[in-house]
């Protein structure tokens, strides 16, 4: 089945079974494909379009699972007892990497220039792009960025918001900033004075 990965479309699959001799005599690409599809050319054991698409889907899902299995949590074998914040991330890391959980972090801290910044961060997206080994080891700081779900620089008075692979940003709402999970479509309310929403829990750390 692995050889199926080289064919992007069903037509590519049929073309691979058409010989130069076939084209010489038939002089018609569509006719050559039809003969392969009917089993008169090629191996004689040609997949139907539905079978081809099913095998492509199966191969894609298998490759995704391989990728997920290979990814080891950066928190493995790390002593994070000094940081309740890191411990909360570590508790969720494997679930996030395997697509079973989505998490939004809110951070308010000082950047490298000493400016106070805050932001809502898609932890799943950051786990894929940031070096959390270095973050857990204290060699690198986890800070809000202008590319995160929401970002605000309190000194410069600049702000930005961006969708991520896991969340949409809803800014035109009377109640304030909201996020929508792209998987289960649930809306998340980040106002600490209100419930966070269905299938959502909020954990506050000092």
Image (tube, rainbow, N blue to C red):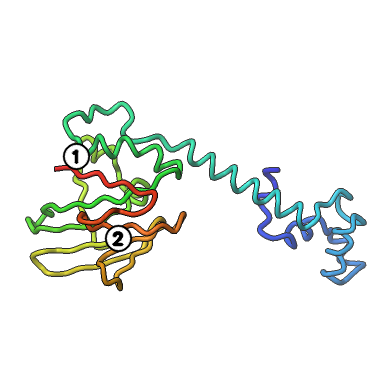
Say left or right for 151 vs 180: left
Q: Is residue 75 above or below residue 53?
A: above
In front of the other: 35 or 64: 64
Figure quadrant of residue 131:
top left
Label 2 SS: loop
Give the x, y percent position of residue 68: 48, 40
Give the x, y percent position of residue 140: 20, 43
Figure quadrant of residue 15:
bottom right
Give the x, y percent position of residue 113: 9, 57
Q: In this view, does 193 lie above or below 75?
A: below
Label 1 Cα crowd, 10 Å radius (few <14 / some 14-19 / many 20+)? few
Q: Mark 1 points at which residue?
A: 139
Q: Is residue 135 above or below residue 150?
A: above
Please state which of the two labelled residues, at mark 1 or mark 2, is closer to the viewer: 2
Say left or right for 117 vs 46: left
Label 2 Cα crowd, 10 Å radius (few <14 / some 14-19 / many 20+)? many
In front of the other: 33 or 116: 116
Q: Mark 2 points at which residue?
A: 149
Mark nearer the N terminus (1 vs 2): 1
Figure quadrant of residue 30:
bottom right
């Amino acid at each position: 089945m692995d050889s199926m990965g080289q064919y992007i479309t069903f037509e590519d699959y049929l073309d691979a079974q058409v010989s130069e001799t076939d084209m010489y005599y038939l002089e018609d690409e569509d006719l050559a494909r039809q003969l392969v599809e009917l089993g008169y050319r090629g191996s004689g054991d040609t997949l139907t379009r539905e079978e081809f698409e099913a095998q492509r889907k199966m191969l894609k899902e298998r490759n995704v699972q391989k990728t997920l299995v290979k990814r080891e949590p950066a928190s493995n074998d790390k002593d994070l007892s000094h940081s309740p914040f890191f411990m909360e991330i570590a508790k969720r890391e494997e679930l996030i990497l395997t697509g079973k959980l989505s998490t939004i972090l809110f951070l308010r801290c000082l950047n490298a220039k000493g400016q106070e910044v805050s932001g809502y961060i898609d932890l799943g997206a950051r786990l894929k792009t940031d070096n959390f080994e270095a973050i857990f080891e204290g060699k690198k700081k986890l800070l809000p960025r202008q590319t995160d779900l929401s970002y605000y620089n309190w000194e410069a008075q600049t702000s930005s918001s961006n969708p991520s692979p896991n969340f949409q940003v809803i800014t035109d709402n009377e109640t304030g900033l909201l996020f929508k999970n792209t998987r289960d479509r649930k809306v998340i309310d980040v106002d600490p004075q209100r419930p966070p929403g269905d299938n959502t829990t909020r954990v506050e750390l000092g």
